[in-house]
């Protein structure tokens, strides 16, 4: 170990403020993902030192009941013992090989077994890679160029999809991104969510979050997904479900089983890696045969199918029987009902949508059906007060009005009740101005 490294390791533990100051000197905005900078809520971000179950502890020693849970990746809660054990055991055998391993086959088999219609997958290292690759596959398989997406749906930071991109850009007050050229999005068409777009013969793929969870939580209207399926079939386009969030959170079959609608392609992430960086895309054998080395659509990645991520994913998914999904939905229902009563009882106009284990929050009296509605809610300016009021009381929510809550299997009934009690206090403060 170098003397410089020894000196660095010997430095006293930093507070959140000190760490954020140091981070801003070496990381853009002091963070590695924009929402973490607290720009849309104000203040200094807390730096997580360690976590267990439903709770995170920051560098100042404060604890928070955590509803971020790595934006849904930690469905079991933080540092689940079985997941940690699987990672530790896998690490002793080697951390990356650039060669096939047994566990990536086992994970792929499990995903195909659980999701109706999914026959083959290709592993990636992130959800962004998964959606990017699935779009490339759709274009290569159809010989068409046009991509249709919905405003407010975030599909990762790939250029062609980073327009009207939901929480990925909306929390920063942006509608897109500098550096994304007009030519990069020339073949991208944006439609309002919950309105079935009219496709044409140039459309390669319609990509959709089957339950929109990047503009707050916006459920699909009855018949919307089925109508999207029918419209794709009418013109010979492919339907792509971005299930990076909904996959293996709405149940073993994800949004496909939940909705009864089967797409042509899927993108997954988060839960399937047990908290480690992972993603995958997949579809029917016919479509996946277009992917190299079987076909002409190239996709690759040095760390794809990483042995630690696949070990963690198998350990996490192996604990998700139907009883655990029932438990998760019961917890989410208790949280949603409690927040609705607490904030509504304080006289605030709120919408608390819930789909399975996902819970949203809008400060609005009107139902939210699309991104324009979600923006109307965000523009009330009430979310930052709610966020900081809850944070001060020891409850961590994602720092942006376009995010959702991710209760985990580690959240106890008592912790949900404490959350609701705190929300009642915060609601009264907001109502009093």
Image (tube, grey):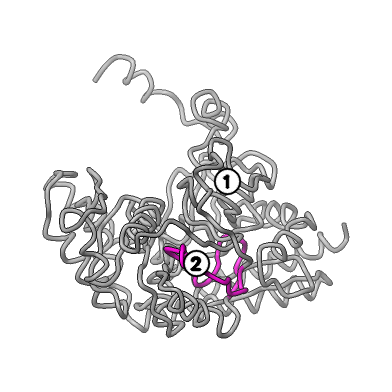
Q: Tell me if mark 1 has few (under 14), some (14-19) or many (20+) residues whose alpha carbon lies within 10 angstroms of its own.
A: many
Q: Where is residue 125 in the image (x, y as percent from the top left)?
A: 31, 50
Q: Mark 2 highlights which residue?
A: 208
- Residue 317 shown left or right of residue 218 in the figure: left
Task: Nearest to the eye among marks 1 and 2: give it.
Answer: 2
Q: In the figure, is residue 293 to the left or right of 218?
A: left
Nearer to the camera, 175 or 431 = 175
Q: In this view, does 46 lie above or below 417?
A: above
Q: Residue furthest top?
A: 3
168 with respect to 229 (left or right): right
Q: Is residue 111 above or below residue 69?
A: below
Q: Front-most of 77 and 31?
A: 31
| Earlier-in-chain disc, 1 versus 2 | 1
Residue 145 appears in the rendering: yes
Q: What element carries label 2?
A: strand
Query: Which residues, given as a range, are shown in magenta?
Result: 193-219
Relative image position of residue 269 (x, y in whole percent)? 37, 60
Drawn side of residue 271 relative to residue 402, left or right = left
Where residue 202 appears, x then y in whole percent?
46, 62
Q: Mark 1 points at which residue?
A: 35
Query: Is 107 located above or below residue 306 in the figure?
Result: below
Q: Quadrant of the C terminus?
A: bottom right
Residue depicted at x 16% and y 60%: 103
Judged from this view, the residue extending furthest toward the front is 201
Mark 1 and mark 2 in contact? Answer it, CB < 8 Å: no
* Residue 402 location (% of width, % of height): 63, 58
């Amino acid at each position: 170990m170098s003397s410089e490294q020894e000196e660095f390791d010997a430095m006293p533990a930093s507070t959140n403020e000190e760490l954020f100051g140091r981070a801003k000197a070496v990381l853009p905005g002091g963070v590695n993902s924009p929402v973490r900078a607290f720009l849309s809520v104000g203040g200094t971000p807390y730096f997580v030192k360690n976590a267990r179950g439903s709770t995170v502890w920051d560098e100042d020693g404060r604890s928070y009941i955590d509803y971020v849970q790595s934006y849904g990746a930690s469905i079991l809660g933080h540092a689940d013992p079985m997941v940690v054990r699987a990672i530790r055991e896998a690490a002793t055998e080697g951390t990356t090989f650039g060669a096939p391993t047994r566990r990536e086959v086992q994970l792929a088999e499990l995903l195909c077994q659980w999701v109706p219609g999914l026959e083959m997958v290709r592993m990636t290292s992130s959800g962004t890679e998964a959606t990017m690759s699935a779009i490339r596959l759709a274009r290569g398989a159809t010989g068409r160029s046009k991509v249709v997406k919905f405003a407010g749906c975030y599909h990762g930071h790939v250029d062609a999809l980073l327009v009207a991109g939901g929480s990925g850009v909306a929390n920063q007050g942006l509608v897109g991104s500098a550096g994304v050229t007009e030519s990069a999005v020339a073949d991208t068409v944006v439609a309002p969510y919950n309105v079935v777009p009219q496709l044409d013969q140039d459309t390669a793929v319609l990509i959709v979050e089957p339950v929109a969870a990047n503009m707050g939580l916006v459920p699909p209207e009855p018949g919307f997904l089925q109508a999207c399926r029918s419209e794709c079939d009418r013109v010979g386009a492919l339907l792509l479900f971005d299930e990076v969030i909904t996959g293996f959170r709405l149940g073993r079959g994800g949004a496909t089983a939940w909705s009864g609608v089967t797409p042509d392609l899927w993108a997954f992430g988060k839960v399937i890696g047990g908290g480690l960086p992972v993603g995958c895309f997949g579809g029917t054998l016919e479509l996946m045969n277009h992917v190299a080395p079987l076909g002409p659509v190239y996709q690759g990645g040095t760390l794809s199918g990483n042995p630690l991520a696949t070990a963690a994913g198998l350990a996490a998914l192996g604990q998700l029987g139907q009883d655990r999904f029932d438990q998760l939905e019961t917890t989410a229902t208790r949280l949603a009902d409690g927040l609705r009563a607490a904030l509504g009882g304080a006289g605030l106009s709120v919408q608390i949508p819930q789909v399975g284990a996902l819970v949203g929050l809008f400060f609005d009296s009107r139902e939210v059906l699309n991104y324009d509605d979600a923006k109307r809610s965000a523009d009330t300016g009430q979310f930052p007060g709610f966020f900081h009021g809850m944070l001060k009381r020891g409850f961590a929510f994602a720092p942006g009005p376009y995010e959702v809550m991710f209760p985990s299997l580690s959240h106890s009934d008592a912790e949900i009740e404490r959350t609701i009690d705190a929300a009642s206090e915060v609601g009264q403060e907001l109502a009093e101005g």
